[in-house]
């Protein structure tokens, strides 16, 4: 009779422990999935915004001074970042002579495509 009680208590304790652990693990796992989904959506939106900006404007000076530049800057190659940083400091037509709007737009689109591949969105 004592063996039955011990097995019932052990089973009940194991069930309660498992339930308690699951009630903490499930929301945490769901939060991780949701966080990843939001990060991917944010990245897709940034890529889309840069591409739409290129369609509308495409000038190197206006991009360096836009709100998109600081958001995409950390993800660009170091060489291209240096070009944009230099442009931001110079603010003049002398710098624009080095880059035509079309050449800049093509380079920016190449950079964004590489970022997109790196993030696993393409």
Image (cartoon, rainbow, N blue to C red):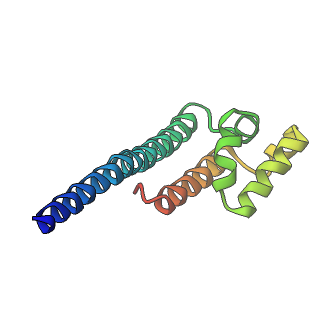
The tally of labels here is 0
Quadrant in the picture for residue 4: bottom left
Residue at horizontal 49 percent and vertical 58 percent from the top: 119
Q: Is residue 5 positioned above or below 41 on the image?
A: below
Q: Is residue 30 positioned above or below 81 on the image?
A: above
Viewed as shown, does residue 78 lie left or right of 114?
right
Viewed as shown, does residue 64 lie left or right of 111?
right
Residue 42 screen position, x and y as percent: 49, 41
Residue at horizontal 80 percent and vertical 47 percent from the top: 97
The answer to which of 12 and 40 lies nearer the viewer is 12
Residue at horizontal 61 percent and vertical 46 percent from the top: 105
The answer to which of 24 and 3 lies nearer the viewer is 3
Residue at horizontal 47 percent and vertical 61 percent from the top: 117
Residue 64 screen position, x and y as percent: 75, 40
Residue 22 screen position, x and y as percent: 31, 52
Q: Is residue 102 positioned above or below 1 on the image?
A: above
Q: Which image quadrant: the N terminus?
A: bottom left
Which residue reaches farthest bottom? 3
The answer to which of 11 and 53 lies nearer the viewer is 11
Q: Which image quadrant: the C terminus?
A: bottom left
Quadrant in the picture for residue 111: bottom right
Quadrant in the picture for residue 54: top right
């Amino acid at each position: 009779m004592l063996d039955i009680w011990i097995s019932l208590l052990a089973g009940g304790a194991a069930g309660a422990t498992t339930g308690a652990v699951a009630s903490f693990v499930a929301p945490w796992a769901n939060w991780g999935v949701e966080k990843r989904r939001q990060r991917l959506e944010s990245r897709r939106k940034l890529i889309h915004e840069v591409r739409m900006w290129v369609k509308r404007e495409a000038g190197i000076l206006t991009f360096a001074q836009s709100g998109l530049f600081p958001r995409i800057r950390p993800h660009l190659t170091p060489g291209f970042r240096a070009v944009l940083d230099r442009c931001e400091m110079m603010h003049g037509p002398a710098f624009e002579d080095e880059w035509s709007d079309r050449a800049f737009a093509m380079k920016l689109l190449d950079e964004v495509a590489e970022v997109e591949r790196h993030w696993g969105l393409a």
